[in-house]
Image: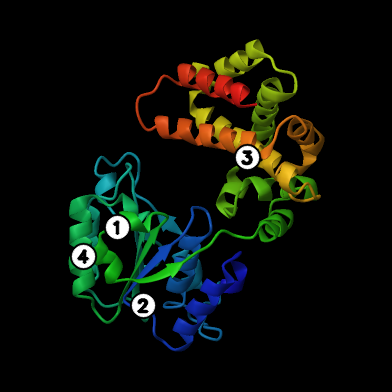
C-alpha cells in the first residue's frame, strides 16, 4: 500500500484516486529528483493491477502476486547481449526497461513494443516501467513513441526520470506527468530511525545531507562523510579564520590524490554543504537550521570572520568548478585556483 512509502503524500492521493476510479492512464511520466521513490511508487501502482486481495483499490503487499512483482531479474552480467534485454520480475505482467550499460537501447524498447501488444497473463493490466527514461537512445525514444501513439487498452507504461526535459516533447505530450518533490527532512529522519538502526543524532545528520533524497540517505557512508567534512572544514578554516595558503594547497592536493579520484566530486558536495551552513549561520543561526548541526561551533567560528557576500561568492566559485568538470579540466590546478580565490574573497 502507498502508506508504506515515504513522502510525496500528494502523489499518493493522486494515484489512489486513479485506482479507485479505475482510470489509470495508458502512459504516465513520473518526474522528480533522484532517490525520492519514483520507481517504488510505479511498482506499487503495478501491484494493484495484479494483486489478489485489493484493499480499497490498493495492493495488499503480502499476496503471492504482490511479492512476485518486487522480485526483479536483470540480465546476467555474463550475457554479452544483456544491454539489449528487458529486466523481468517474477510476475509476467510487470516488466522493466532500464539502462544496463549507461543507456536504454532500441532493442529493449522494441521488445517492450512487441510485448505491449499482448493481453495480461494473470492480472488486469500489463505494466511496463522505463526506469531512467532520459537514458534512452534516440532510436529507442522513437520506438517508444510509436507504442505511445497506438496503446492497447490493457497496457500501462510508466516513464521514470529525474530529467523530464531530456525526453522528446512528443513523448511528454502523450504521457500524464506526475511530479515528485524532495522528501521532508523530518520524514527521512523518522524513516532512518525506524528502519536503519541509526541513532537519532546520526539520522538527523543524514536527513540533512540527503537534501530530500531518501535513497541518498540510505546509501551514504557516514564515516566517509565525516572524514571528508573534517578535511573541508580545515580548508574553510584556513581560508577564513586562520589564513594559511600552504594548508589550503595541501587540502587541494589531498582531494586530487589519484587514489581518491572517485571521491573528488563528493568532496565538492561536502564543501558546498558547509558553505551553505555558514550562510545559514549568518542569516538565521537558530538551532536545527544547519545540516551539520553537530559541528555548529566550527561553522560559527567561520561565520564570525566573513559576511554573506563572501559566502555567496564561495558558493558561486564551487558551482563554477562543477561546470568545469564537464570538460577535460586539470583538477589539481582547478582546485588550487578554487581555494585561493575563496581566500581572496574572504
Q: Which mark is residue 122?
A: 2
Q: CA distance from mark 1 to mark 2?
A: 32 Å
Residue highlighted by disc 1: 167
Q: Residue at point 48% right, 81% down? A: 52
Mark 4 and mark 1 in contact (Cβ < 8 Å)?
no
Q: Is residue 87 above or below residue 252?
A: below
Q: CA distance from mark 2 to mark 4?
A: 26 Å
Q: CA distance from mark 3 to mark 4?
A: 40 Å
Work out whether mark 3 precedes mark 4 in sequence or the reverse, and give the earlier one: 4
Could you say where residue 332 lies in the image, as x and y percent from the top left? 48, 17
Decide if residue 39 is on the left or right side of residue 207.
left
Residue highlighted by disc 4: 145
Decide if residue 63 is on the left or right side of residue 84.
right
- Residue 99 in view here: yes
The 10 Å Cα crowd at callout 4, few under 14, some 14 to 19, many 20 or more, is: some
Comparing labels 1 and 4, the label whose residue is closer to the camera: 1
- Quadrant location of the N terminus? bottom right
Work out whether mark 2 precedes mark 3 in sequence or the reverse, and give the earlier one: 2
Residue highlighted by disc 3: 273
Quadrant in the rendering for residue 96: bottom left
- Residue 62 in view here: no
Mark 1 and mark 3 in contact (Cβ < 8 Å)?
no
Q: Residue at point 47% right, 16% down? A: 333
Q: Is residue 133 above or below residue 27?
A: above
Amino acid at each position: 500500500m502507498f502508506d508504506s512509502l515515504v513522502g510525496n503524500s500528494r502523489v499518493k492521493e493522486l494515484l489512489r484516486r486513479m485506482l479507485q476510479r479505475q482510470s489509470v492512464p495508458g502512459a504516465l511520466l513520473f518526474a522528480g529528483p533522484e532517490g525520492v521513490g519514483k520507481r517504488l511508487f510505479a511498482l506499487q501502482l503495478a501491484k494493484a493491477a495484479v494483486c489478489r486481495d485489493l484493499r480499497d483499490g490498493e495492493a495488499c503487499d503480502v499476496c503471492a502476486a504482490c511479492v512476485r512483482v518486487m522480485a526483479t531479474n536483470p540480465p546476467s552480467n555474463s550475457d554479452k547481449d544483456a544491454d539489449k534485454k528487458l529486466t523481468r520480475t517474477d510476475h509476467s505482467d510487470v516488466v522493466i526497461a532500464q539502462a544496463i550499460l549507461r543507456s536504454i537501447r532500441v532493442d529493449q524498447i522494441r521488445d517492450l513494443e512487441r510485448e505491449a501488444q499482448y493481453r495480461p497473463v494473470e492480472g488486469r493490466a500489463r505494466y511496463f516501467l522505463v526506469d531512467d527514461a532520459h537514458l534512452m537512445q534516440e532510436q529507442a525514444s522513437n520506438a517508444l513513441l510509436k507504442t505511445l501513439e497506438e496503446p492497447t487498452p490493457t497496457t500501462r507504461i510508466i516513464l521514470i526520470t529525474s530529467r523530464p526535459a531530456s525526453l522528446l516533447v512528443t513523448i511528454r505530450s502523450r504521457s500524464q506527468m506526475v511530479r515528485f518533490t524532495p522528501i521532508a527532512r523530518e520524514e527521512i529522519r523518522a524513516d532512518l530511525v525506524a528502519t536503519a538502526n541509526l541513532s537519532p543524532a546520526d539520522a538527523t545528520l543524514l536527513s540533512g545531507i540527503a537534501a530530500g533524497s531518501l535513497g541518498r540517505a540510505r546509501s551514504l557512508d557516514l564515516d566517509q562523510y565525516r572524514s571528508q567534512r573534517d578535511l573541508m572544514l580545515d580548508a574553510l578554516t584556513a581560508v577564513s579564520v586562520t589564513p594559511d595558503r600552504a594548508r589550503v594547497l595541501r587540502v587541494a592536493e589531498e582531494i586530487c590524490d589519484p587514489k581518491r579520484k572517485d571521491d573528488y566530486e563528493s568532496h565538492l558536495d561536502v564543501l558546498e554543504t558547509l558553505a551553505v551552513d555558514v550562510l545559514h549561520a549568518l542569516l538565521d543561526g537558530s538551532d536545527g537550521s544547519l545540516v551539520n548541526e553537530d559541528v555548529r561551533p566550527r561553522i560559527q567560528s567561520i561565520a564570525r570572520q566573513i559576511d554573506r557576500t563572501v559566502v555567496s561568492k564561495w558558493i558561486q566559485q564551487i558551482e563554477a568548478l562543477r561546470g568545469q568538470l564537464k570538460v577535460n579540466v586539470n583538477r589539481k590546478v582547478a582546485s588550487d585556483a578554487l581555494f585561493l580565490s575563496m581566500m581572496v574573497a574572504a
